[in-house]
Image: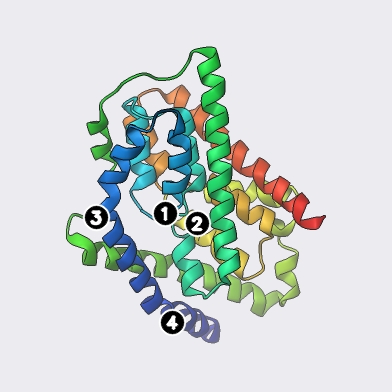
Amino acid sequence: MMHIVEESVMDSVRLIPFLFLTYLLMEYWEHKAGERSQRLIGRAGKIAPVLGGLLGAVPQCGFSAAAAGLYAGGVISLGTLMAIFLSTSDEMLPILLSEKAPAGLVLGILLAKAVFGMAAGLTLDFILRKKGKQRQGGDPDICRKAHCHCGKGVLCSALAHTARIVFFLLLVTFALNLVLELAGEDALAGLVLNRPVLGPLVAGLVGMIPNCAGSVVVTRLYLEGAMGLGAAMAGLLAGSGVGLLVLFRVNGDLKENLKITALLYGLGVGAGIAAELLWKL
């Protein structure tokens, strides 16, 4: 057991410098361009889901949260909100970069999430416009309730993010090392997350954990071979960071929030199953 703990700690600690530098750059970008991005997407009109898919893929901790506030205020459409939620990379990108994942893999996942988010968002808005159910107008200031900065600048935010992610990585790594030690490497392939259809269904639920834990778990399990590509895509698409949590807090329509949650889960899992089938062809 001590060997497992030591190995887990070392595996997690070695990532700290890479994670911290990545979060430092991300926080600098968000502090400089975050509010500008929100104003831009609020004025984009019919092409807002396209911008949402692109901006959502940029790893900003507050963007999905701010999007929930903008939607609650009627500033952006459901399609735009869904495009942002589906494309949000949350903690996936820093972990992939710190683990030195192949550039093709990183870009491929980001592009797939962004394109699917755009397509889903544009389709939803088209359907809602045809039915005359698009939201009109609203107050953009409501999104301030959704801001997630610690309020102490770039360095504080980067340190806080790094510490939180290292903690979750340590827990996941310990669990994986324990499975490997007790059952061997072949046990990973037999985990439920590696099974067709059932894997994406479960991974979608894991990804929807309303904090950074969901994307941390999904990304790490995929890199360790404990989760297939389809399940990983389902979890990463269904995961929106704290976006859903903020939506339930600032949007007073509980029934609508539940419908959005179910839609996000269904789209993510459906895309994950499709990706699994295409990968096997």
Q: Nearer the viewer, residue 50 or 26?
A: 50
What distance separates the C-alpha of mark 1 from that of mark 2?
15 Å
Residue 162: quadrant of the picture: bottom left
Across and down, in percent, residue 38 comes to: 31, 41
The reply to whether discs 3 and 2 touch (Cβ–Cβ < 8 Å) is no
What distance separates the C-alpha of mark 4 from that of mark 1?
25 Å
Residue labelled with disc 2: 215
**What SS does tag 1 mark?**
loop
**What SS does tag 3 mark?**
helix
Q: How is the image coloured?
A: rainbow
What distance separates the C-alpha of mark 3 from that of mark 2?
25 Å
Mark 4 or mark 1, whichever is nearer to me: 1
Q: Amino acid at mark 1?
A: Val
Residue labelled with disc 4: 14
Residue labelled with disc 1: 58
- Counting residues from the start of the chain, the first of labels 1 and 2 encountered is 1
Q: Is residue 249 above or below residue 103?
A: above
Rendered-image quadrant of the N terminus: bottom right
**What SS does tag 2 mark?**
helix
Across and down, in percent, residue 16 comes to: 38, 76
Query: For residue 269, which numbered disc appears in the image?
Result: none
* Residue sitting at x 42%, y 25%: 254
Residue labelled with disc 3: 32
